[in-house]
Amino acid sequence: MANNTTELGTAPVYKLLWKYALPAIIAMTASSLYNIVDSIYIGHGCGALALGALTVAKPFMDICAAFGSLVGVGASSLLAIYLGERDYEKANMVLGNVIVLNIVLSAIVMAAGLIWLDPILYAFGASEDTIVYAHEYMEIILYGNILTHIYFGLNSMLRSAGHPRFSMTATIVAVTINIILDPIFIFGLDMGVRGAALATVISQAVAVVWQLTKFMDEGELVRFHRGIWILDRGITKRALAIGMAPFLYNIAHCFVVIIINNQLKNYGGDIAIASYGVINRMTFVFAMMVMGLNQGMQPIAGFNYGAKQYHRMLQSFYLTCLYATGVMAIVFVLGEFFPEAVTKVFTHDPVLINGTIGPMRIICCSMLIIGFQMVTGNLFTSIGMAGKSIFLSLTRQVLYLIPLTLVMPMVFAEPLNGVWWSIPISDTLSAITAAVMLWIQISKFKKMIEEQEAWISSTPPEPD
């Protein structure tokens, strides 16, 4: 364990990035199969309306995930920083606090969601035709919400604790079980969308058991033991502050999806919502790969920031940006040149296929800059700069996308096209904002590096 954390400050950065990012990419890509597999089975087995219902339910799932990221992402960044500072007592306290906070917050979200389930789904764009499917799916997901939060929280902790491969294995275990159970529950037991949700919850329960075995190992530096279960005010406050950026991003994204779904319902009906769902699921797979790269970068950047090795932190950022841009270039090619083939993976409905081709080309035209935007926001999160990370998280959703989604339909002759074009335009504006903030921050880091080098050169060597 000590070797795993020490290497973050000594091993070549490009090797570290692949060592930590590759398992995370595999894990995040596999994790994205939750939505992809459910969508494929539901689209072909339950129809276009059920697929539209899944699109309506997704922002609600994102809200649940937002509370998980509030704890998990913030705590894992804090864990990496404490390990870089060699404060192992606080690192262990972070682990205990993650479990307790996740249980408390997920229980609150579950209770509130079950009480107001239908009104929430209607607000998210459900119609009389899709509400039944959306309700059946989300009811099961909410009952398993505590397991979901613990699963994602512990996976983040595993990566920061120096176990990216173990984290990857936990995800692969969950996805494999989900893929096996989906057709059994949906088709074999004729459970429909309920079966898809139940398969997801059961698969995550098995993964949590797998994760717990690692943190119960007495040979681990970061592990479960007495004294870590009482919430520490300082750790909790700092973890929540760091995690506030992804939390607000997810919450803002949910409200954006609510607005987009309702605008699509007004101008294009349930088929337009289903089209948006298909596009989201295609881009989601590759966005998860970028998130995997981000997760690989996070412990490297956080550790070296805590150790004041700023040049290594910046090197990890530059490499991650390069790889992320390459990943999103694949999305650009698929969306611009093969939209019909992509859509047919999810549905055989000719109306839905024809209604998705044009919007997919519009949305994917800005994909080449998405990777840079995502990695820049993650850099600020990784090094604990909560305020800047929060601002970047909100620019795309609140500052740009919400106003554009409401205004653009009034500008275009075809209002539905205005909704579609609001997405790539907001991506472009937010990428420009991120570039300006990054340039300012990198200038500060370079100055700090120069001061370090000047101090080292002026310090006389110790006598033999």
Image: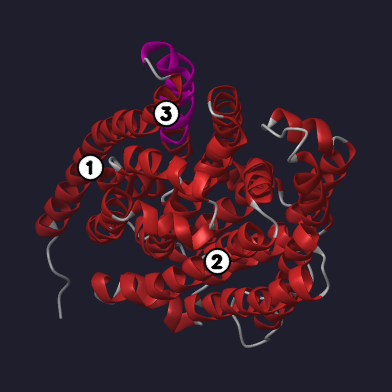
Residue 96 in sight from this viewpoint: no
Question: Which quadrant is home to the C terminus?
Answer: bottom left
Q: Position of residue 438 (x, y in %)?
A: 27, 38
Of all residues, the one furthest to the top in this rendering is 410
Q: CA distance from mark 1 to mark 3?
A: 20 Å
Q: CA distance from mark 2 to mark 1?
A: 36 Å
Q: Residue at x 41, y 58 (%)?
A: 342
Horizontal arrangement in the rendering, residue 343 relative to residue 187 (left or right): left
Disc 3 residue type (three-letter)? Thr
- Image label count: 3
Quarter of the image where one finds residue 447: top left
Residue 346 drawn in magenta: no
Q: Residue at x 34, y 34 (%)?
A: 424
Q: Position of residue 109 (x, y in %)?
A: 79, 44
Residue range (magenta): 392-412
Kindly check if marks 2 and 1 are in contact, taking CB atoms under 8 A apart as contact. no
Q: Is residue 456 above or below residue 417?
A: below
Which residue carries the number 3 mark? 395
Q: CA distance from mark 2 to mark 3?
A: 28 Å
Judging depth in this view, the residue of 126 and 163 nearest the camera is 126
Residue 69 in sight from this viewpoint: yes
Residue 401 drawn in magenta: yes
Kindly check if marks 2 and 3 are in contact, taking CB atoms under 8 A apart as contact. no
User: Residue 33, labelled with which disc?
Assistant: 2
Disc nearer the start of the sequence (2/1) = 2
Q: Secondary structure at mark 1?
A: helix
Disc 1 residue type (three-letter)? Ile
User: Residue 338, labelled with which disc?
Assistant: none
Disc nearer the start of the sequence (2/3) = 2
